[in-house]
Image (spheres, rainbow, N blue to C red):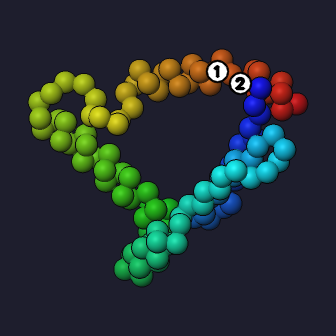
């Protein structure tokens, strides 16, 4: 089978990096938050609002999109969850999966 190692590092402060390596330890994917464009946007907003934590600005666009989807759905009168928004059922399934996998992952990491 194929083996993949996923390593995520919250570097402290307002930066995070995720590195995906293959079984031989070769990096196959790296993602850094914020990217250069977002860093520039956050720096600009921090000048106007220096008392706001930088990570709020990093997440602002995602939260705005989420709120807009939820507001549009509520205003439409339709039932259910907006497209692309996790429901409580999805959250419960994710937690159930995590509970199922935790003992095996702990064993493998020991």
Residue 2 locus on image (x, y percent): 75, 31
Q: Residue furthest right?
A: 110
- Residue at left offset 59%, top offset 21%: 97
Residue 92 visible at all: yes
Residue 102, numbered circle: 2
Quarter placement of the C terminus? top right
Q: Nearer the viewer, residue 12 or 82?
A: 82
Residue 46 visible at all: no
- Residue at left offset 28%, top offset 29%: 81
Quarter placement of the N terminus? top right
- Residue at left offset 62%, top offset 25%: 98
Q: CA distance from mark 2 to mark 1?
A: 5 Å
Place residue 47 in its image quadrant.
bottom left
Q: Residue furthest front?
A: 1
Place residue 108 in its image quadrant.
top right
Place residue 71 in its image quadrant.
top left
Q: Can you say whether 78 is above or below 55 in the image? A: above
Q: Are marks 2 and 1 in contact (CB under 8 Å)?
A: yes
Residue 13 locus on image (x, y percent): 62, 65
Say what secondary structure mark 2 lies in: helix
Q: Is residue 26 left or right of residue 46?
A: right
Q: Nearer the viewer, residue 23 or 66?
A: 23
Pointer 1: what residue?
A: 99
Residue 12 locus on image (x, y percent): 66, 61
């Amino acid at each position: 089978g194929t083996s993949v190692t996923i390593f995520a590092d919250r570097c402290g402060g307002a930066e995070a990096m995720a590195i995906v390596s293959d079984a031989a330890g070769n990096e196959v994917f790296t993602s850094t938050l914020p990217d250069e464009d977002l860093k520039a946007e956050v720096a600009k907003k921090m000048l106007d609002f220096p008392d706001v934590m930088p990570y709020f600005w990093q997440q602002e666009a995602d939260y705005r999109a989420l709120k807009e989807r939820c507001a549009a759905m509520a205003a439409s009168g339709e039932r259910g969850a907006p497209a692309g928004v996790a429901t409580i059922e999805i959250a419960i399934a994710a937690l159930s999966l995590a509970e199922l996998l935790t003992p095996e992952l702990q064993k493998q990491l020991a």
